[in-house]
Amino acid sequence: MKVDILIIGAGPAGMAAALAAAPSGARIAVLDDNPAAGGQIWRDGPQAHLPPLARDYRQRLEAQANIEHLPATRVVALAGPKALLVEDPEQGRVIEYDRLILCTGARELLLPFPGWTLPGVTGAGGLQALIKGGMPVAGERIVIAGSGPLLLASAATARDNGATVLNIAEQAPWSKVAGFAAQLPRWPHKLLQSFGLFHPGYRANSHVFEALGEGRLEAVRLNIGGQLREVACERLACGFGLIPNLQLGQALGCHIDNGAIAVDAWQATSLADHYAAGESTGFGGSEKALVEGAIAGHAAVGERNAAQRLWPQRQRWHGFATALNAAFALRDEVKHLARPDTLICRCEDVPLAAVADHQGWSQAKMASRCGMGACQGRICGGAAQALFGWQPPVPRPPFSPARIDTLLQLGADAHSQA
Amino acid sequence: MPELTLDGRPLLVAPGTTVAAALLLGGDGTSRTSVSGQRRAPVCGMGICQECRVTIDGQRRLACQTLCRDGMRVESRP
């Protein structure tokens, strides 16, 4: 398969990029790991309620004859210059492209704490995604913890689906949360959203201390403003904000700056004909992703005037992103929740004691198998970066577990590139 | 409504339901046994953490990224 423009990720950034580039007549493919377009924020399912804007983008994406949406498809490896090896449930194949737009989004930062591997403990965004996909939570008692506005959104989804949300523990101090809230009138749409999310159990300066239970979660011990409190519950959703998905950008050789794919005013990366937009260029929400995606799409087809007209709008949402990231910066306390026997690597069951004394990620990995499991260090590598400041190395293929049949698609030439 | 088999038992779910949701609708919600013998359940819900990997029709797949289909056979225990 060969396309003019290949877009990795069908979330807000990827959809906006495809729709901006489509009127040029370019042949466009948008591939995405999820079963439907929309990314995580607009994830569909039997218990999801998509906003009208999400429906509009999805309908327009489907209506464009020159946009092909490839759902349930993952990038497995590089397959030579401007070619990627991808896999879906049926087949593996190589897609060649002329221009690439990386809209790989972000994942939740999950930090280890005692008991975090118990069934019943999920990410905060994780809980929301699982509920949207039909997971029943009616009648459950749920504690939500971590950091950022996603905690409130997750609580709202849980409550709408019949759960009782007992506590929301935000690690940021009240001063920072209040300062952020006070700035919201600069983005009226965000202010309106926040009104629907108020929760009486919300506490700042608070964090999870440990999860308790035999074989599954039975209770959570929380640190609420310095006081330890035990709360019986069926579920704990804990996420410490979002971190950009950099693996593919790193593997391609795009310059990474400050934990995000570096881009110029046209959303172009350091690599010619390779663009990036949305959370992979820095966490900032769906509005930032939509405008960056549109700029990347216009720029990729040479429509510089159309791209430039969107710069002021991008500027506005970059302001929101800056305020957001400053308010919910991680406090040191939440980086020291794990004990020596707490597992850091969930894939290989490696405890903190086996990794903490090493100099860096590669050494810890060689000595302990930390990061060598199925998730390829996406969870423990993100945690190790937050806990120890270890930089993740350039990922090696396969970027995610793949079938042998798929890997055989790599010819001898392509193999030397990968 | 798709009808699947979860660990040998039939289960009817709403259209669009993920296999991750089916694990709790038809069982205890767990998906796999870790290398040190702990049961685990879906965590990230978005195809990153790999905790929800199960066997679907003989292939290792992520439960959270797979929609239930009629006749699907899902196994969560070795």
Image (cartoon, rainbow, N blue to C red):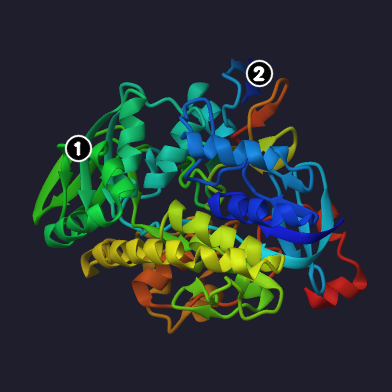
Mark 1 surroundings: few (<14), some (14-19) or many (≥20) residues within 10 A? some
Note whether residue A349 is visible. no
Q: Secondary structure at mark 2?
A: loop
Horizontal side of A356 relative to A60 (left or right) equals left
Q: Label 1 is placed on what type of residue? A: His
Q: Which residue is mark 1?
A: A199
Label 1: chain? A
Q: Quadrant of residue A273?
A: bottom right
Q: Position of residue A70 (x, y in %)?
A: 73, 46
Q: Label 2 is placed on what type of residue? A: Pro
When the figure is inspected, residue A27 is found, relative to residue A39, above or below; the finding is below
Q: Which residue is mark 2?
A: B2
Q: Quadrant of residue A202?
A: top left
State if disc 1 and disc 2 touch (CB < 8 Å).
no
Front one among A415 and A366: A415
Q: Nearer the viewer, mark 2 or mark 1?
A: 1
Q: Position of residue A331 (x, y in %)?
A: 23, 67
Question: What residue appears at the point 68 percent right and 72 percent down from the top-left corner?
Answer: A274
